[in-house]
Image: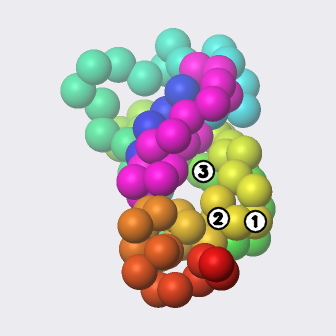
């Protein structure tokens, strides 16, 4: 997972890295070096919505969001672009 302050173009999704952006930019200041971030039921969450709850262990929960298209979501769920291509889901 990559948690971005904004939502710029990010190609990490090709490698199975989920790009998330803060829903509330002020939440950026709630995370400190050494904090542990926990995402629960992430597969189910990205299939149903673009909003993801991110627990900051021992503190609170913030909301993040992804901007994946349906195709990018499929790629993410199989672990990245290489796995997606291996599955043969790309038509020639």
Q: Is residue 44 visible?
A: no
Q: Is residue 9 above or below residue 82?
A: above
Question: Tag 2, which secondary structure?
Answer: helix
The earlier-in-sequence mark between 3 and 1 is 3
Residue picked out by circle 3: 53
The reply, left or right, for residue 3 in relation to residue 36 is right
Q: How far apart are the alpha carbons under marks 1 and 2?
A: 5 Å
Q: How far apart are the alpha carbons under marks 3 and 2?
A: 17 Å
**Residue drawn at x 53%, y 64% as measured from the top left:** 76
Q: How far apart are the alpha carbons under marks 3 and 1?
A: 20 Å
Which image quarter holds the C terminus?
A: bottom right
Q: Could you say which is closer to the camera, residue 56 or residue 64?
A: 64
Labelled pair 1, 2 in contact (Cβ < 8 Å): yes
Residue picked out by circle 1: 70
**Residue drawn at x 35%, y 19% as measured from the top left:** 32
Marker disc for residue 73? 2
Q: Could you say which is closer to the camera, residue 76 or residue 31?
A: 76
Labelled pair 3, 1 in contact (Cβ < 8 Å): no
Crowd band around label 2 with a 10 angstrom C-alpha radius: few (<14), some (14–19), many (20+): many
The reply, left or right, for residue 21 in relation to residue 85 is right
In the displayed orientation, state which residue is furthest to the bottom.
Answer: 88
Image x and y of residue 25, in percent: 67, 18
Question: Tag 1, which secondary structure?
Answer: helix
The earlier-in-sequence mark between 3 and 2 is 3
Crowd band around label 3 with a 10 angstrom C-alpha radius: few (<14), some (14–19), many (20+): some
Image x and y of residue 65, in percent: 68, 43
Is residue 7 found inside the magenta-colored segment of the image?
yes
| Magenta-tinted stretch | 5-20
Image x and y of residue 66, in percent: 67, 46
Q: Is residue 66 above or below residue 77?
A: above
């Amino acid at each position: 997972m990559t948690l971005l302050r904004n939502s710029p173009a990010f190609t990490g999704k090709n490698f199975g890295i989920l790009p998330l952006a803060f829903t509330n930019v002020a939440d950026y200041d709630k995370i400190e070096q050494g904090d542990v971030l926990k995402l629960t039921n992430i597969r189910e969450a990205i299939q149903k919505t673009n909003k993801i709850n991110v627990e900051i262990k021992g503190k609170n929960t913030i909301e993040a969001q992804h901007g994946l298209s349906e195709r990018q979501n499929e790629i993410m769920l199989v672990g990245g672009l290489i796995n997606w291509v291996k599955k043969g889901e790309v038509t020639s």
